[in-house]
Image (cartoon, coloured by chain):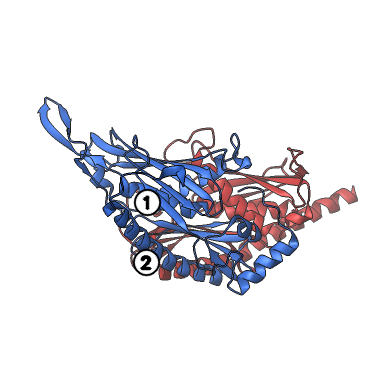
Amino acid sequence: LKTGIISQAKGSAYIEQGNTKLVCGVYGPREVQKKSDFSLNGQLFCEFKFAPFSCQKRRGHQQDNEELVLSGLLREALEAAVCLHKFPKAQVEVNVMVIENDGSPLAAALTCASLALASASIPMYDLMIGTSVRQIPKLFLLDPTKDEEWQPELNHDENNSNLTVGFMPSTHQVSAYVHEGVSKTEDLEQMLKLATEYCLKVQPVVQLCLKETVEKILSNEGEKVDE
Amino acid sequence: MAEILLSEAEKAYIHHGVQDDLRCDGRTRLDYRPIILETGLVSNASGSARLRLANSDILVGVKVELASPLPDKPKEGRLEFFVDCSANATPEFEGRGGEDLANEICRFLQRSYASGDTINLSELSVLTGQQCWVLYVDILILECGGNLYDAVSLAVKSALYATQIPSIKVATMDGDQPELELSDDPYDTKRLNTENIPCVVTLMKIGNHYLVDPTPEEECCSSSGIVVAVSGNKKITAVRKIGSGSLHPDSLVSMLKTGSEVGAVVNTILMKKLLEEETLEVSQKVGFMR
């Protein structure tokens, strides 16, 4: 995890989860582009994009349908974490770019985006950590790579599924939950428990990164004052 | 959904009603609104269904066409979904407004049908590696009255149940080009096994309780919910959390359990009704007149 990777953005973060690499930039709060949309709460605009060279098959330049849906999921998850009432009439833009996709891009994006928002000093209720669980008959795999992820074309049998969860550890709330595949409810319950335990373990890492960011900002400002 | 303006008093009223298990229209938390379903409306389509769930009106048409299968799946046919939110449904859908919602519903349907348990795509194969049936499922949202996911999934399941795929025989191989013979008899068709096709259940959380089949006003009051696709044998094929609020893991799990039970019940009732409709001797289609 690393913050401050985009110098021009208000806040930014870079995450490497195994071979999955992605960058998130946060811009705002800015004035809302469409003046007609007055609202008492701030708005969040998310854009999720795979770089054309990130996956095994080349992806187009424009956002395709899958990316649009992922953007919507990311936005809904982040809206639960961000204090929208703190910036009325303003909008915050979150841009996620996947540089290399080796499994669980949405989970990594959730963690990275919340870290970027926090480093941009956007008021939030809690940090959000994303994780994904793969279910195969008799086993659960945490944080699968691309080869281990559930492919609808390959695995047709039962009890094969993929679950991505966005979890806020301090408030113990689930803000994103996406499941595909075939499972029983008991298995889903267990997968969710595994995911939440994992998020609680990852939380100190994210907090440490944020703490270092804040220390760096403070020491920079200290230097400026000295000059 | 349409712009619903609710006063604080109305929101409080809905909250209290949900707590007491008595919603604004007299239903309990787990009751559905009345559903009107009719299949076989569109004669040009191989299968069609119209479903009216209180104020939500969905029309689904299924067309079958021959095409070459995907290179990595030579023994299987394909199912392609397309959702169109008509501008008539609500003023927000004018122009390209409804595209986001249409896209979300489309992707969710694709994901819930993707696992092999739901529909047997190898039934759609005509000639391995060369020809297969592609089912184009086109969904038209004519009116939006809350709970679109459920209505769309039920309508699609009914349309697929009513779909008649012409029988095709492979005649002699003329060199490398096989000749496909379409049967002359328009009634010589085969049907798909739609037992395990998933039904979607939407559960919205209001206060400490969750409801099934929310009206637009209830959707406004709620901050979050889940959409669960349940297949015939109580298995869950896709789940998605909707709304901008967050859920506690325990409430999420209990919502999933309730969702799967409700989904199984809806599935059995729908299959029963579809069978009834088939055996019913009705010559005149009611269509949009009611």
User: Quadrant of the image for the N terminus of chain A?
Assistant: bottom right
* Chain ID, mark 1: B
- Callout 2: SS: strand
| Identity of the residue drawn at 68% across and 43% down | A6
The image quadrant that residue B117 belongs to is: bottom left
Q: Tell me the blue chain.
A: B
Q: What residue does disc 2 label?
A: A139
- Callout 1: SS: helix
Q: Colour of chain A?
A: red
For marks 1 and 2, give the one nearer the viewer. Answer: 1
Q: Is residue A201 visible?
A: no
Q: What residue does disc 1 label?
A: B157
* Chain ID, mark 2: A
| Identity of the residue drawn at 17% across and 32% down | B184
Answer above or below: position of B172 versus B222.
Answer: above
Amino acid type assigned to the residue bearing label 2 in the image = Leu
Closer to the camera in the image, A197 or B116:
B116
Which residue of the protein is positioned furthest toward the top in this rendering? B175
| Percent coordinates x, y for residue B207 in the rendering | 64, 69
| Percent coordinates x, y for residue B280 in the rendering | 29, 53
